[in-house]
Amino acid sequence: MTDSYDDEIEASRAPLLDHLVELRSRLIICVAALLVGFAVCFGFSEPIYRFLLHPFAIASQLLAAEQVAHAEQAGGFDIGKFFAGTRDLFLALVGAREVPASAEGDKLNLIFTAPLEFFFTKLKLAGFGAVVLTFPVLAWQVYGFVAPGLYKRERKAFVPFLLASPTLFLMGAGLVYYIILPFVLWFSLSQQIVDAQVSVQLLPKVSDYLSLVTTLLLAFGLCFQLPVVLTLLGMAGIVSSDMLKAGRRYAIVAVFVVAAVVTPPDPISQTMLALPIILLYEISIWCVRLIERARRREDEAGTDIVPV
């Protein structure tokens, strides 16, 4: 069994120069894909930005409807009004309540304070979109470069993670777009003061809004990679299910600390990031346990285990 693995690796060996040539060609493909993705995203930067404004529109429309229903302007904090608004927003997000239409002439107001600020915001948006759009190409090029150095069993084990990683990232991004971002924006809008004497209104800059969106998308998308990371560590024998279970209480504290650091300073977004991550941590324990069971069955069958 070991001899066949050694033969497999020996057949995949190549001179250093060949590896450098292959690395150069794959880097060229990655750069070309990023440039194409950047050009496409920059060409559609305005529609993409409008798409990212949709959660802001939902929050604004719901808050305007609440103000009309209560026949009062947005003002001092009221705990009953806050929980009623939170309930209405949640029902609208899950489709149990229709989002009120915008009043005629009512529109979102964002500003930019430097002449080229919105242009550079579009460039940043295009760069972020290019990475997201071309991720399958980038991931496949990385896999294609490292795959010849892996055993056949390792290559088979690596492929599911190429599918799980973007899937989990999209799940985190979907949670941000459809739930977290509307809640954060609704809470921010609810702090406005508009009356005859005082006007304190939220007028976000286009660059600040994009920074908020991209920060939340990256924070949730990367934190949702926890099962992938812990499962790989379990395959490598660095962590075990017993170790993860013993460290559960410390992991929960660490999750809330990370959530407090990477999300805006409000308890809503922090809690909504922490709870899914804790659930993913429990899923990771289950995945590592499955790996350990498979490893024990192979040991009982007398199969040699090749380390990852």
Image: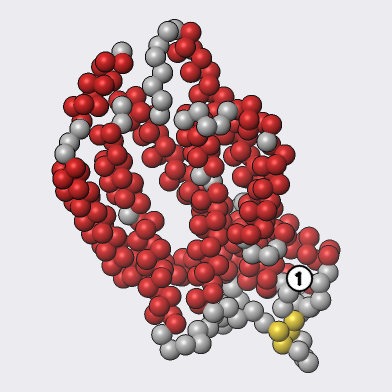
Residue at image location 25% in from the left, 17% down from the top: 4
Q: Is residue 208 positioned above or below 26 on the image?
A: below
- Could you tell me how many numbered marks the image carries? 1
Q: Say which quarter of the image contains residue 89.
A: bottom right
Task: State which quarter of the image contains the C terminus.
Answer: top left
| Residue 19 position in % (x across, y down) | 20, 43
Q: Which one is in front, 288 or 95? A: 288
Q: Residue at x 27, y 64 (%)?
A: 35
The single residue placed furthest to the bottom in the displayed view is 197
**Residue tagged by mark 1?**
69
In the image, is 190 to the left or to the right of 233? right
Q: Nearer the viewer, residue 88 or 32?
A: 32
Does residue 110 appear to the left or right of 62 in the view shown? left
Q: Is residue 287 left or right of residue 167?
A: right
| Residue 152, percent from left and from top | 30, 25
- Mark 1 residue crowding within 10 angstroms, few (<14) / some (14–19) / many (20+): few
Residue sitting at 31 percent across and 50 percent down? Answer: 138
Where is residue 65 drawn, in percent x and y? 69, 70
User: What amino acid type is highlighted by mark number 1?
Assistant: Ala
Viewer-side residue, 196 vs 142: 142
Q: Quadrant of residue 159?
A: top left
Q: Quadrant of the N terminus?
A: top left
